[in-house]
Image: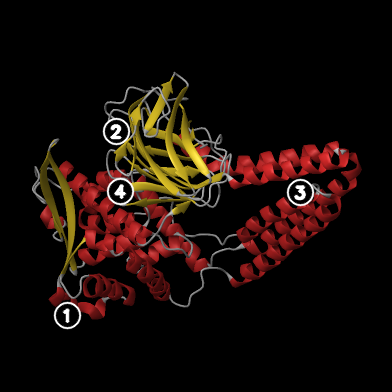
């Protein structure tokens, strides 16, 4: 009888386990649209998609109000049908509570073996902080309290004004495979998948004037501090991991010798890397170039200047700089228009831009163009514009897939314009290969140690990875490239430190070139506005005949602001269309908020 009872108990346990496994759910996706309002609050619309296996009747949502105000204007819908607050648990109802620390809602439905998507809409007050120099949004959209892995999280953050890299900096915190990009004037951050107990957050700084009605204000400077924090975030995380590994190894005395061996291997690799650097990697001296350079290297086109300045890479600045250089030389004009609309909220306006091709001039002087310049014109007007002499920026954004494909080929044409001249000294390339080989040997030794002794091998592995990254520091530029990069860096410093103020009369004839090369070298809108403000009032058309501004007050300040806005819009359009973005940073987790939820 005892045997029969034991068998029955086993069968019940197996059946119960099967029943438990039979009822499960997964979160297939979270899509969030967040908008920062002028009063410092954050308007959030979040869609949560669930896949249910078995029968479910409720789901919940919890939001930490740490560093935030309150949740207001809450609304819950599904397929356009609103859920209503109620005290019972009837389908289509919800129960909500809130205190100074948390906001919580639980809603009720009936689901069985199906997918359901719920839409939560609310406003969070006091979401941004306004400092003396910037405004900051540091917000956690998914909390580390989340118990489920999420297949995909896609967040779009809209600021009070269109976001671009000249005025806005943004970072995503969470898994390293997450991504962030500026798209259509907004910040988009996405990750797929998001593991359980892992946060997903954004940190962004933008002009403080964009939050004029925000109540949370701190009389302190914050921009440099925030930039420093983000720069060292990944290094701090790696240091913490290494410290924990070292502490664990110290506790395991029997692995002491393996620890020492691992350290010796890393030290040997460091010595080898230093030796290789001194032999192959010490930079060539630069002669005849000061810290600040006012002479534009006219023999180096803007896109090639960007290629050299970024050490063999190309950014969106190369696209924008080339576009305005073509306009400066008479091939293109840029037309600004203001589209006025009326709505229930009153009149509003939207500034739009259009490129016009001077086709006759293009045919007469196309021999003066570099292949990549000619290719840009033909792509924009013949392919995207289908033979038209005009193309709106909106059309460029709408053709993102085509632009991305073209940009990949266009980068090759820019590199061809530089020619067969190498960027890096051949001897240093040889030294770099040796340095990489040393780093790989250290990593291999670390793997062997880890295989037999466990965690002590991590020191050699991590050290080898660090050495692998540092090994590329042995690369040195050729004397020609080093000289040219120093000159470009001098031009950039000359403009960014506003040294042109003392030479206003001398640079009047070069202001177009300064604008073009300032863009190509990645200068922000503030510097460009300062440069353009030197154009005498009423004489803008004489300096920038290729720019057709909408009606303004004619002052130099208005013109500088208008051209700076045009540059920002062009950069945002081309970088978004070409798919030029960034990735997520490890660490973080200090943002306000943090949502989580489950179902049952």
Mark 4 or mark 3: which comes first in sequence? 4
**Residue 405: image x %, image y %?**
38, 70
- Viewed as shown, does residue 235 lie left or right of 142? right
**Residue 267: image x %, image y %?**
78, 51
Report if the CB atoms under discs 2 and 1 are less than 8 Å apart. Answer: no
- Viewed as shown, does residue 47 lie left or right of 379? right
Identify the disc placed on residue 547: none
Q: Residues within 10 Å of mark 2 (few under 14, many from 20)?
A: many
Q: How is the image coloured?
A: secondary structure
Identify the disc placed on residue 459: 3
Which structural element holds mark 1? Answer: helix
Task: For marks 4 and 3, give the CA distance.
Answer: 44 Å
Report if the CB atoms under discs 4 and 3 are less than 8 Å apart. Answer: no
Quarter in which the N terminus is drawn: top right
Q: Nearer the viewer, residue 422 or 171?
A: 171
- Viewed as shown, does residue 266 lie left or right of 3? left
Residue 89 appears in which quarter of the rendering? Answer: top left
Mark 3 or mark 1: which comes first in sequence? 1
Q: Residues within 10 Å of mark 3 (few under 14, many from 20)?
A: many
Which structural element holds mark 4? Answer: loop
Q: Nearer the viewer, residue 127 or 457?
A: 127
Mark in front: 1 vs 4 = 4
Q: Is residue 31 visible?
A: no
Task: For marks 4 and 2, give the CA distance.
Answer: 15 Å
Mark in front: 4 vs 3 = 4
Task: For marks 3 and 1, give the CA distance.
Answer: 64 Å
Mark in front: 2 vs 1 = 2
Which structural element holds mark 3? Answer: helix
Q: Is residue 319 visible?
A: yes
Mark 2 or mark 1: which comes first in sequence? 2
Task: For marks 2 and 1, give the CA distance.
Answer: 51 Å
């Amino acid at each position: 009888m005892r045997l029969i009872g034991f068998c029955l108990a086993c069968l019940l346990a197996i059946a119960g386990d099967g029943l438990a496994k039979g009822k499960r759910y997964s979160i297939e996706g979270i899509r969030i649209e967040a908008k920062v309002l002028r009063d410092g609050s954050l308007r959030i619309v979040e869609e949560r998609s669930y896949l249910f296996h078995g029968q479910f009747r409720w789901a919940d949502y919890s939001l930490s109000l740490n560093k935030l105000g309150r949740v207001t204007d809450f609304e819950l819908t599904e397929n356009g049908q609103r859920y209503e607050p109620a005290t019972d648990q009837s389908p289509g109802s919800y129960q909500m509570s809130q205190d100074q620390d948390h906001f919580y809602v639980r809603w009720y439905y009936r689901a069985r073996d199906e997918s359901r998507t719920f839409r939560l809409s609310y406003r969070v007050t006091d979401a941004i902080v306004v400092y003396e120099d910037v405004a900051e949004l540091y917000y956690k959209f998914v909390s580390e309290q989340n118990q489920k892995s999420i297949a995909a999280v896609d967040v779009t953050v809209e600021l009070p004004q269109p976001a671009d890299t000249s005025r806005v900096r943004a970072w995503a915190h969470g898994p390293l495979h997450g991504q962030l990009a500026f798209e259509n004037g907004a910040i988009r951050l996405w990750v797929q998948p998001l593991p359980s107990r892992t946060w997903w957050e954004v940190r962004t700084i933008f002009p403080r004037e964009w939050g004029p009605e925000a109540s949370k204000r701190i009389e302190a400077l914050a921009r440099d501090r925030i930039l420093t924090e983000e720069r060292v975030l990944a290094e701090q995380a790696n240091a913490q991991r290494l410290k924990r590994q070292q502490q664990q190894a110290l506790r395991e005395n029997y692995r002491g010798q393996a620890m020492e061996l691992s350290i010796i291997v890393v030290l040997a690799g460091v010595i080898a890397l230093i030796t290789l650097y001194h032999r192959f990697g010490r930079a060539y001296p630069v002669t005849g170039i000061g810290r600040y350079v006012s002479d534009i290297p006219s023999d180096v086109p803007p896109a090639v200047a960007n290629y050299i300045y970024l050490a063999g890479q190309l950014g969106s600045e190369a696209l924008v700089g080339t576009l305005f250089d073509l306009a400066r030389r008479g091939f293109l004009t840029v037309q600004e228009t203001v589209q006025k609309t009326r709505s229930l909220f009153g009149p509003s306006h939207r500034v739009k831009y259009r490129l016009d091709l001077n086709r006759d001039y293009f045919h007469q002087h196309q021999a003066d163009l570099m292949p990549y310049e000619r290719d840009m014109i033909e792509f924009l007007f013949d392919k995207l514009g289908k033979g038209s002499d005009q193309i709106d920026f909106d059309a460029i954004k709408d053709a993102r897939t085509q632009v991305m494909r073209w940009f990949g080929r266009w980068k090759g044409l820019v590199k061809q314009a530089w020619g067969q001249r190498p960027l890096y000294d051949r001897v240093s390339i040889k030294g770099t290969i040796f340095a990489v080989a040393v780093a790989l040997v250290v990593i291999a030794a670390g793997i062997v140690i880890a295989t037999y002794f466990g965690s002590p091998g991590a020191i050699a592995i991590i050290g080898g990875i660090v050495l692998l990254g540092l090994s590329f520091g042995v690369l040195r530029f050729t004397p020609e490239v080093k000289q040219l990069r120093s000159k470009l860096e001098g031009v950039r410093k000359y403009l960014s430190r506003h040294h042109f103020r003392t030479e206003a009369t001398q640079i009047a004839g070069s202001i177009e070139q300064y604008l073009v090369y300032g863009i190509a070298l990645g200068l922000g809108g503030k510097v460009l506005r300062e440069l353009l403000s030197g154009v005498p009032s009423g004489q803008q058309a004489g300096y920038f005949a290729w720019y057709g501004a909408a009606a303004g007050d004619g002052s130099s300040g208005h013109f500088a602001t208008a051209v700076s806005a045009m540059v920002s819009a062009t950069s945002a359009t081309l970088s978004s269309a070409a798919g030029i973005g960034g990735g997520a940073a490890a660490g973080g987790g200090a943002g306000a908020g943090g949502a989580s939820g489950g179902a049952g």
